[in-house]
Image (cartoon, rainbow, N blue to C red):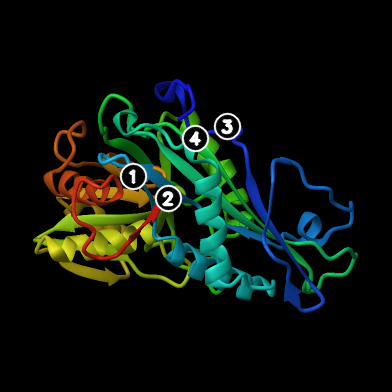
Amino acid sequence: MKNIDWSALGFDYFKTDINARAYYKDGAWSKLEYTDDEYINMHMSTTCLHYGLECFEGLKAFRGVDGKVRLFRADENAKRMQSSARKLCLPEPSVEMFVEACYEVVKRNIDYVPSYESGASLYLRPVLIGTKVGLGVKASHEAMFIVFCSPVGAYFKGGMKPIKVIVDRMQDRAAPRGTGDTKVGGNYGSSILSGEKAHTLGYSNVMYLDAVEHNYIEECGAANFFGIKDGKYITPKSASILPSITNKSLRTLAEDMGLQVEERPVPVSELKTFEEAGACGTAAVISPIGYIFDLDTDEKITYGNGNEVGPNCLKLYNALQDIQYGRAEDKFGWTMIVE
């Protein structure tokens, strides 16, 4: 293991030794290759630079309580990248190639997987970009697939804390029947302005609503939303929401805990009826929401006293982290040991 101060890490790029690459040309993928080169040599007229023909994924590997390194649900990330690629008309990496690249990148950088005691992890960023050179707006039948990694710090340093969120209708995250259900860069680019506004006002995230009626909850920042009430785990359903692998895992755990799971449209007016609420995703697993402020209506919603994590959020968070760090049996087959 590298002599790194894991506690000083944030969520940022940290150089590691090896990344994986493969190229699609003439109807076939090349074999995976591994390099220490951090840069891409690219023509200035490459389609990904002009027309947004790129998508990406995010997943993690964890050094467990038993010292073993576990990669979490890479096959699900592979399937989601295929879905993104289909919508952008990009060549699809096979699930097998995707998982192999992730496994090998972790294995070849295993000394960068943070210690168990640190609560940190190794973040993997698979990227798929269209590499066809041209000027016209059309599909790219050439592509590059890359997987790199970076150790990242524990999201909640000093303990899990609720976040403050605003509902802001001034900017939409994604259009109906657009790319909201895929992990493409344009979705994140369109959220920067409202995200910066939220941070300026002292809030962590923006609660995005549907782009037609501005009445139904879609995503919370770059994460899925869920609420807890009446023994139910409730999460929004919409064609514009990215299907979160963390949310999918939490729904399984919620059912295992005896909660009833509902995936359905959730009107913004329902926010005040929840006993607990949270945002979920790879980075934090769960960010409990303590306080929501609606900029248009001046309505303020507080969960609990706004400063404490709700019991169901905490139980779900611990249940997922216990599997990821090897503290509990992985009865769902979600992890892969990297040796």
Q: Is residue 171 left or right of residue 7?
A: right
Q: Which of disc 3 and disc 4 is earlier in sequence? A: 3
Q: How far separated are the C-alphas under marks 2 and 1?
A: 8 Å
Q: Measured along the vertical axis of the image, is residue 296 above or below residue 95?
A: above
Q: Residue at x 43, y 48 (%)?
A: 60
Q: Which residue is the extreme one toward the front?
A: 339
User: Could you tell me which secondary element the residue under label 3 belongs to?
Assistant: loop
Query: Pointer 3 and pointer 2: residues touching (CB < 8 Å)?
Result: no
Point out which mark residue 112 bears. 4
- In percent of width and height, residue 198 lies at 47, 36
**Any part of residue 267 in sight:** no
Q: Measured along the vertical axis of the image, is residue 161 above or below residue 79?
A: above
Q: Residue at x 28, y 48 (%)?
A: 278
Point out which mark residue 14 bears. 3
Q: Which of disc 2 and disc 4 is earlier in sequence? A: 4
Kindly report which numbered mark, 4 or 3, lies closer to the viewer in this rendering: 4
Q: Measured along the vertical axis of the image, is residue 90 above or below residue 150?
A: below
Point out which mark residue 339 bears. 2
Mark 1 — residue?
A: 68
Amino acid residing under circle 2 = Glu
- In percent of width and height, residue 32 lies at 67, 61
Q: Residue at x 42, y 41 (%)?
A: 205
Rendered-image quadrant of the N terminus: top left
- In percent of width and height, residue 200 lies at 49, 29
Neighbour tally class for label 4: few under 14, some 14-19, many 20 plus, Cα within 10 Å: many
User: Could you tell me which secondary element the residue under label 4 belongs to?
Assistant: helix
Amino acid residing under circle 1 = Lys
Kindly report which numbered mark, 3 or 2, lies closer to the viewer in this rendering: 2
Amino acid residing under circle 4 = Tyr
